[in-house]
Amino acid sequence: MRVQRRGWRTALAVALALGGVVALPAAAGAAPHQVRDDFNGDGYADLAVGAPDGTVAGRAKAGFVGVLYGSASGLKTSTKRVFSQNSAGVPGTSEAGDRFGSALTTGDLDQDGYTDLVVGVGGENGGAGLVQVLWGGPRGLSGAATLASGAAHNALGAKGHVAVGDVDGDGATDLLTAVDQYGLVATGGPFTRSGAAKGERQVVKDRYASRVLDLDVGDLNGDGITDVVAAQTGTDTFDSRRVAYWWGTKDGLTDWTLVWDIDGASLQGGENLAVGDVNRDGYADIVVGRAIDGYESDHDAYRAKGGRVTWIPGTSGAPDGVAEQAVNQDSPGVPGTAEKGDRFGTDVQLADVDGDGYLDVVTGVPGEDLGTPTDPDRWPDAGSVVVVSGGADGLTGAGSHQVVTQNSTGVPGAAEKGDAFGGAVHVGDANGDGLADLVVGAPGENANAGAVWSFRSRGEYVASPGGVPLPATVLGPNGTFTFGHTLLGTTAAKARLGSGFAN
C-alpha cells in the first residue's frame, strides 16, 4: 500500500505509501503524524525482513522474520527481534515448509495508532496458506493473531498476495488477499486483537482465470478512496502479463478492469509493482517491474531486454496506459547495459531518496554480472540496485540515476557469484531526517544463507566539476552496515535472508 500519510519529524512533511515516500514542503506548525512502519510509535521507521526458507528448530523452510527498530541514528542492531510460529503469542507451530514471512506488509489494523506487521505463511497446511498479524505497541511488536486461512492449493499469504488499505473510505484498514484463479478478497477492518474483522467481506472475481503476481494500493483517480492494483498473468502461461485494478468506493471495490495500451489491447505488465504519485499531480501512478525476459510477448514490450520498469500515470479518469514510459539499462542515463537475465525491475519501490520532493524508483537487478566478460574475476549474478530519478515528467525527465553494488566504495563486503544483491529492496526513513533510506537484500549471499545491507541517504546536493548541482547519493557517510544470521541468532543454511521486506 502506498496511501500517502504525512509524518516526518523534520522540516519536510513526507507523504508515504507502503513502500515509498514523497518529500513535500511542510506546512508551518504542522503536527507530525504516524510514520509508516513505525511499530513502536517513536517516530522512526522500523525494518522487517523475511527469510521464508529459513530453518526453525530444525524444520526446513519453516520461515522467520527479523525486525530492527529505527532511531535518531538509524536502524539499531541492539534492538533486533526474530519472530516465527514458535514465538510466544504467535498462533501455530513452526513446521517444515510453512514459509512464515513469505509475504510482508504493514498497517494499523486495529486502529490503536501503532503500525502492525502482516505476515504471509504461504506454505501452511500443505500450501493452503495463512495470513497472520503481529501487533504493534509502545514496546514494539508483541502478540499475534490469525487473520485469514486458505483452502487447499490457494497459496494464501504467498509473496505478492497480501496488501492492506482502506478501500471503502470508512477510515479503517482493510485486508486484501489474492487467490489464484479466483480474484481478490477484501476483508473489512478494523480487526480485533483476536483477528476477527468488524467489517464486511467482499469477493471480486476476475474476468479471466489468472494468477496474481503482486498487489499494491493507492488513490489512482484522486477521489480520496484507496484503489487496488495487481500484476497478473494467465494461469496457463506466463506470457500474458497484464496490469489490473479495482476502484475503491464507499460501497467497496468495483469490478476488475485492465490498463490498456495505445493499440487498445491490455498493456504488457510485469511481475512487480508499486503505486505512488511520482509526478506530484495529485493522482497515484503505477510503476511496474518486468524483470523476467525471454518470452514471445517481449516483442510487444518496449525495452524488455534484461528487464524494464514502466511508469503509468494516474489521471482523474483511469490509469493512462497510452502515456506509459518504459526504461531499462539501455535507456539514457540509467547505469549499466541491458543484458538478458539481468532482471532489472525486480522488487520496485517508490521513495524520495534525494530530497527533491519527487518519488524515485528503487529497483533491484539481482542478475547483474559484475566485471567484464574477459575478466577472470567476473561475478555472474552478483547483483546491483538502481535508483531511477522521478520528476514532473515521470521517469524520463532531467535527473541523475544511481547504482549501488557490493563493490561500491564504502559498501561492506565484496561482490561474489550468485549473491543476487538487489533480490529485494526496502525504503523507509529509519533516522527521521526526512529522506528515505535504502535497505537491500542479497538472498544468495554465502551459499544462499542471505544477508541485508542498510544505507543511509545523504540529503545535501553536491556540486559537480561543472558547477551543476547533483542529487545526493544513497551512500551516506558513517551510515552503511550489513547484518545477517550472526546478529539475528538464526540458522544460516539455505535461509535466503533478505528475500523480502515489509513494503
Image (cartoon, helix red, strand yellow):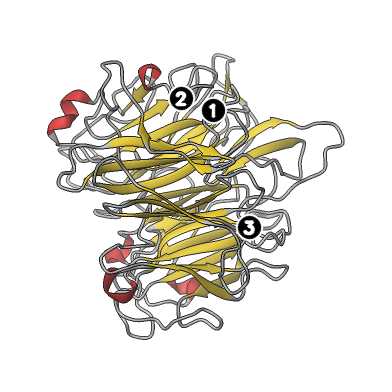
Q: Secondary structure at mark 1?
A: loop
Q: Is residue 451 above or below residue 322?
A: below
Q: Nearer the viewer, residue 291 or 322?
A: 322
Label 2 or label 3, whichever comes before in sequence order: 3
Q: Amino acid at mark 3?
A: Asp
**Amino acid marked by disc 2:** Ala
Give the amino acid at mark 1.
Asn
Judging by the rendered image, the residue that carries numbered circle 2 is: 318
* Residue at 60% over, 55% down: 37
Q: Residue at x 54, y 14 (%)?
A: 466
Query: At which x and y percent is residue 407?
Result: 38, 46
Q: Position of residue 139 (x, y in %)?
A: 70, 71
**Which residue is more in the foreground, 463 or 93?**
93
**Which residue is pictured at 17% across the width and 46% down the height?**
376
Q: CA distance from mark 3 to mark 1?
A: 24 Å
Q: Position of residue 274 (x, y in %)?
A: 45, 39
CB within 8 Å, label 2 to label 3: no
Q: Nearer the viewer, residue 102 or 438?
A: 102
Other-residue count near label 3 (Cα within 10 Å), few / some / many at <14 / 14–19 / ≥20: many
Residue at image mark 1: 221
Q: What residue sits right under mark 3 in the picture?
A: 108
SS of the residue under disc 3: loop
Residue 358, by quadrant, is top right
Furthest residue toward right: 29
- Decide: marks 3, 1 in contact (CB < 8 A)? no
Q: Nearer the viewer, mark 3 or mark 1?
A: 1
